[in-house]
Amino acid sequence: MDVGSKVWSLRSFLCSKQPQLLHPDKNNNSNGSISNHNHNHHSHMCWRSSVAKPTSWSMVCGFMLFGLGLISLLTGHMASHVEWYSQRFVHRTLHSAQDGSERAPIDIWESQYSRYYYGCKERGRNFAPAVSERKSNGYLLIATSGGLNQQRTGITDAVVVARILNATLVVPELDHHSFWKDDSDFNNIFDINWFITYLAKDITIVKRVPDKVMRSMDKPPYTMRVPRKSEPEYYHDQVLPILLRRRVLQLTKFDFRLANDLDDELQRLRCRVNYHALRYTKPIRQFGQKLVMRMRKMANRFIAVHLRFEPDMLAFSGCYFGGGEKERQELGEIRKRWTTLPDLSPDGERKRGKCPLTPHEVGLMLRALGFANDTYLYVASGEIYGGDETMQPLKDLFPNIYTKEMLAGEELKPFLPFSSRLAAIDYIVCDESNVFVTNNNGNMAKILAGRRRYMGHKRTIRPNAKRLSTLFMERHQMDWDTFAEKVKASQRGFMGEPDEIRPGRGEFHEYPSICICEKPYIDQALGEDVFRPPKLAAENLTVKEDSSLDEENEDSIRLPKQSVGRARRW
């Protein structure tokens, strides 16, 4: 059979199946009128195709090649991800078959597809063991920058950079001079012994440079700042020679100083650091868990909302929130702290979806999505701009609102002088919530969104601010049901569903695609699984009962022993 005959046969087959493909929900119509009408209609369409003039195959191929080239030019990565997208299409089709429709209503509390995915961060077969302190290329000092979650990304990348350089990492130094003015050290926030022990197979970490090494140095440690988003090659070419020459090297203001896209093994190392090694201290974990249990006593499930409606955030955004000249003056003064910020159009920023929602708008979105008036909310936030007046519309929509201050009372006093420890408590409660709602694209929102995806795709809602802003402005021109339907439509793709993760999308800390593995699709009607995928490797360490380091070392308990080769270092 020649090519033309094969294509003609395929076209005839598709025509015979067209009614079922186009109208899956109408084939079982009780009176049969719609189905019969559609059948006749599509049969007529196929008859017209059958008498069409012969097609010029050279012209068809030319158009196809032109279209493929145009798509490749615009996307830049179509070919490399064709297998991934084809698998997504197959799985989406199967999932849709279960639901009866691809536009089936979304469960607002949890994703029904999360059971098909699991967190995977194991080392590859050729991942070389950590280099000992004595054989390493020198000692790497890291000075982080920013708030707690920005420093968390810096610490994660510091471990990866130490691996790239074959260096011994000195426990990173936290930022004491930023806007938050918190003088907490690493061991006040994170479990330092767990951090060192958990990563022992990846890199060597010490608490300080040995005195013997410091005394032997002719000069103090060399200090440098690397460009943002530097590739591993930059560290090899520009940083490693200095480390080898000076033996001790300090990298300052270490935030986002490593490229987003890395080798798969390095990306999985990021996941081991961020989701496992960086565990909070026991007092912080226990206090955070205490607040979670108090929320659970009031309701079996609750929503955590990271409002991020503090004055500094609003000033930085350059947006306007309806507070008149008083708001413009107050936020304008705060905005002067950042001398490099450009002048922005508040209306333009809102249309672009760059403005955080007001507490009232967050409440309207949640009610429109289907959350009832008696739903319990935990609000993670600092000082809300406008205070009670700003919060009251949200409280009217959801009366059961709680904060850490309300849940803890006097018990919170030891933590009050330390903004990073307060942020860590909010982090734990948000992580443990049934639904987490972000209200901006800041560091905490990204870090927690990525963690919740890794830990089982727990429902994470990010407002589609670009589309919602128009709806909020027009909401008085429509009835509630119409508004709710439009909100639901706007939020598709922003609900934390597994298929929102695509290779290369966004920051890795928010979309850790390499560390989320997909189980083979299992049709429940088939009975026993043909293949049972590995157990979910991720475990939520914020709620696990405390025990000794030896008992909690996940690698020694869970991971099979890897045969290690010495291919490349990283």
Image (tube, grey):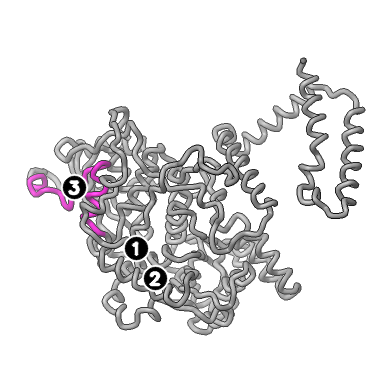
Mark 3 Cα within 10 Å, few/some/many (few <14, many 20+)? some
> Residue 543 — which label?
1
- Earlier sequence position, callout 2 versus callout 1: 2
Quarter of the image where one finds residue 565 = top left
Q: Secondary structure at mark 2?
A: helix
Q: Amino acid at mark 2?
A: Val
Question: Is residue 449 shown above or below 205?
Answer: below
- The location of residue 482, given as percent across then percent down, is 73, 69
Front-most of residues 3 and 503: 3
Q: Residue furthest front?
A: 527
Mark 1 Cα within 10 Å, few/some/many (few <14, many 20+)? some
Give the residues in magenta. 191-215
Mark 2 Cα within 10 Å, few/some/many (few <14, many 20+)? many
Q: Amino acid at mark 3?
A: Pro
Q: Secondary structure at mark 1?
A: loop
Residues at marks 2 and 1, CA–CA distance in whole angstroms: 9 Å
- The location of residue 433, given as percent across then percent down, is 45, 66
Which quadrant does the C terminus fall into?
Answer: top left
Whether pointer 3 and pointer 1 mark residues with C-beta atoms closer than 8 Å, the reply is no
Question: Is residue 34 shown above or below 231?
Answer: below
Residue matched to label 2: 292
Residue matched to label 3: 221
Residues at marks 3 and 2, CA–CA distance in whole angstroms: 44 Å
